[in-house]
Image: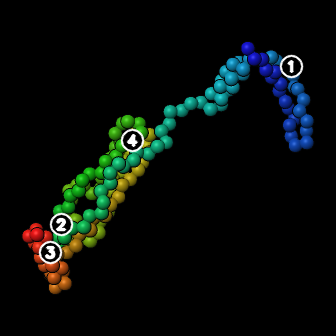
C-alpha cells in the first residue's frame, strides 16, 4: 500500500513560503480520496436537476394556401409538430392556434410550446400565409399550358 504524507500549508500568499501547520500524518491514497469525496459532497450536494429543454424532432414548414374564390379565408391543416425530452416523459405541449384552423387572408404565426417536468421550455414556430384567389395573369396561363404540353409530349415518347 502506498502511503502519502499529508501536510497542511498555510500562508501561501504571494511572496510567502510554505510551512507545515500542525502534525504530519501518514495516510493511504484510498483514505485521501474518500475524504476528498466526502468534502466535495458536503460542499456541493448532488441535485437531480434537468437543465435540458425538450426538443422538436419535427416542426412543420411554412404553408401557403389560396382562399377559395369569393372568400377571404381558408381552412388550413398541417401535420402536428413532434417533440421529445431527455427525461423520457412526454412534455406538455401547447399549440396556438388549434389544428385545423380557419385563417383570413394574410400571414399568421402558428406556435407549439413544449414544457418538461423541470420547467424547461422550447418552441416551434411556422407561418401560414393565405392569399386571395384572383384572376390569373396571361403569363401564368401560358406557363401552365407549356408545362401541360411538355408533360403530354414526354408521356407520348
Closer to the observer: label 1 or label 3?
3
Residue 51 lies, in percent from the top left, at 49, 42
Q: Which numbered dot is residue 23?
A: 1
N-term-proximal mark, 1 vs 2: 1
Q: Which numbered dot is residue 85?
A: 4
Closer to the observer: label 4 or label 2?
4
The local crowd at label 1, few if under 14, some if 14 to 19, many if 20 or more residues have their Cα within 10 Å, is few
| Mark 3 and mark 2 residues within 8 Å of each other at the beta carbon | no
Looking at the rendered image, the quarter that the N terminus falls into is top right
Which residue is identified by label 2?
Answer: 74
Residues 61 and 133: in front is 61
Closer to the observer: label 3 or label 4?
3
Looking at the rendered image, the quarter that the C terminus falls into is bottom left
N-term-proximal mark, 4 vs 2: 2
Residue 25 lies, in percent from the top left, at 82, 18
Which residue is identified by label 3?
Answer: 150
| Mark 3 and mark 4 residues within 8 Å of each other at the beta carbon | no
Alpha carbon distance from label 1 to label 2? 85 Å
Alpha carbon distance from label 4 to label 2? 34 Å
Amino acid at each position: 500500500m502506498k502511503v502519502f504524507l499529508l501536510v497542511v500549508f498555510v500562508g501561501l500568499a504571494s511572496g510567502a513560503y510554505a510551512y507545515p501547520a500542525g502534525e504530519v500524518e501518514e495516510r493511504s491514497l484510498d483514505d485521501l480520496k474518500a475524504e476528498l469525496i466526502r468534502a466535495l459532497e458536503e460542499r456541493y450536494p448532488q441535485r437531480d436537476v434537468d437543465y435540458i429543454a425538450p426538443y422538436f424532432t419535427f416542426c412543420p414548414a411554412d404553408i401557403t394556401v389560396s382562399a377559395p374564390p369569393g372568400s377571404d379565408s381558408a381552412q388550413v391543416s398541417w401535420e402536428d409538430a413532434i417533440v421529445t425530452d431527455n427525461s423520457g416523459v412526454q412534455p406538455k405541449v401547447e399549440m396556438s392556434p388549434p389544428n385545423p384552423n380557419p385563417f383570413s387572408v394574410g400571414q399568421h404565426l402558428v406556435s407549439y410550446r413544449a414544457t418538461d417536468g423541470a420547467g424547461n421550455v422550447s418552441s416551434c414556430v411556422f407561418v401560414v400565409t393565405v392569399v386571395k384567389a384572383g384572376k390569373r395573369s396571361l403569363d401564368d396561363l401560358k406557363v401552365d399550358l407549356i408545362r401541360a404540353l411538355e408533360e403530354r409530349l414526354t408521356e407520348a415518347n
